Image (cartoon, grey):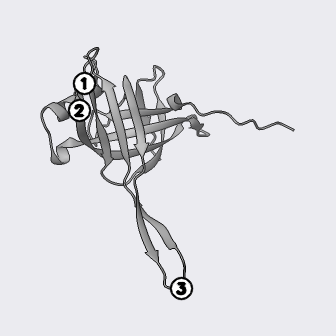
């Protein structure tokens, strides 16, 4: 009988790609040189206490996901350029929305692709230029719509991803 051993999932197994193309012709490029890309789920709670009970009941009625980000700016990096342009030009509204695809390489599918989630996020800048060694940017990507569970492939060089059509 084969023994199923637990295997640690490394942070590097969940790879983020930002669409530098458009909806009709997506071009998902790897989000390289990020020093932070962490999730905060920010659940929306509905709390109430019933008269016949001693404590509160809580239900989660929504999730307001945000991804904290920080990166060292590199020239000739199309992902950095797209985000920096939004921040530096103080872009607002729907023009400040980015499309991010996170591919989970720890979850391969039977056809050689991987489980992935795609979602639109608003770019919410926080700070920049606060390091003396490299020019840095930080902020958060805040959810701007529902996520889409998809399967995706990653190019051989690891720099691009493609959503598989069902």
The residues tagged by marks 2 and 3 sit, at their Cα atoms, a distance apart of 49 Å
Residue of label 2: 127
Residue of label 1: 130
The answer to whether residue 43 is left or right of residue 20 is right
Q: Residue at x 43, y 70 (%)?
A: 47
Which one is nearer the viewer's eye here, 62 or 28?
62
Q: How crowded is mark 1: few (under 14 residues within 10 Å), some or many (20 or more)?
A: few
* Residue 86 figure quarter: top left
Which one is nearer the viewer's eye here, 63 or 97?
63
Q: Residues within 10 Å of mark 3 (few under 14, many from 20)?
A: few
Whether the residues at callouts 2 and 1 have beta carbons within 8 Å, the answer is yes
- Whichever of labels 3 and 1 marks the residue nearer the N terminus, that label is 3
Give the secondary structure at mark 3: loop
Q: Residue at x 47, y 36 (%)?
A: 103
129, above or below 97, in the image: above
Q: How many labels, in total?
A: 3
Q: Residue at x 45, y 23 (%)?
A: 158
* Foreground: disc 2 or disc 3: 3
The answer to whether residue 68 is left or right of residue 113 is left
Indicate the position of residue 125 as horizontal and vertical percent values: 23, 38
Indicate the position of residue 147 as horizontal and vertical percent values: 40, 51
Q: Residues within 10 Å of mark 2 (few under 14, many from 20)?
A: few
98, above or below 78, in the image: below
* Foreground: disc 3 or disc 1: 3
Indicate the position of residue 15 as horizontal and vertical percent values: 46, 32
Q: Which residue is drawn at 25% across and 20% down?
A: 135
Give the secondary structure at mark 1: loop
Q: Seen from this angle, which residue lies furthest top?
A: 133
150, above or below 127, in the image: below
Residue of label 3: 52
């Amino acid at each position: 009988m084969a023994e199923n051993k637990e295997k640690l999932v490394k942070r590097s197994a969940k790879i983020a790609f930002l669409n530098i193309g458009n909806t009709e012709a997506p071009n998902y490029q790897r989000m390289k040189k990020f020093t932070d890309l962490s999730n905060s789920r920010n659940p929306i709670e509905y709390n109430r206490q019933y008269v016949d009970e001693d404590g509160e009941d809580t239900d989660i009625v929504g999730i307001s996901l945000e991804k904290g980000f920080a990166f060292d700016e590199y020239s000739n990096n199309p992902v950095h350029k797209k985000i920096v342009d939004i921040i530096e030009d103080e872009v607002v509204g729907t023009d400040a929305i980015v499309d991010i695809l996170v591919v989970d390489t720890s979850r391969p599918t039977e056809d050689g692709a991987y489980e992935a989630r795609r979602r639109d996020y608003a770019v919410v800048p926080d700070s920049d230029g606060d390091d003396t060694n490299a020019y840095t940017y930080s902020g958060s990507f805040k959810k701007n719509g529902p996520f889409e569970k998809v399967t995706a492939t990653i190019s051989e060089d690891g720099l691009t991803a493609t959503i598989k059509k069902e």
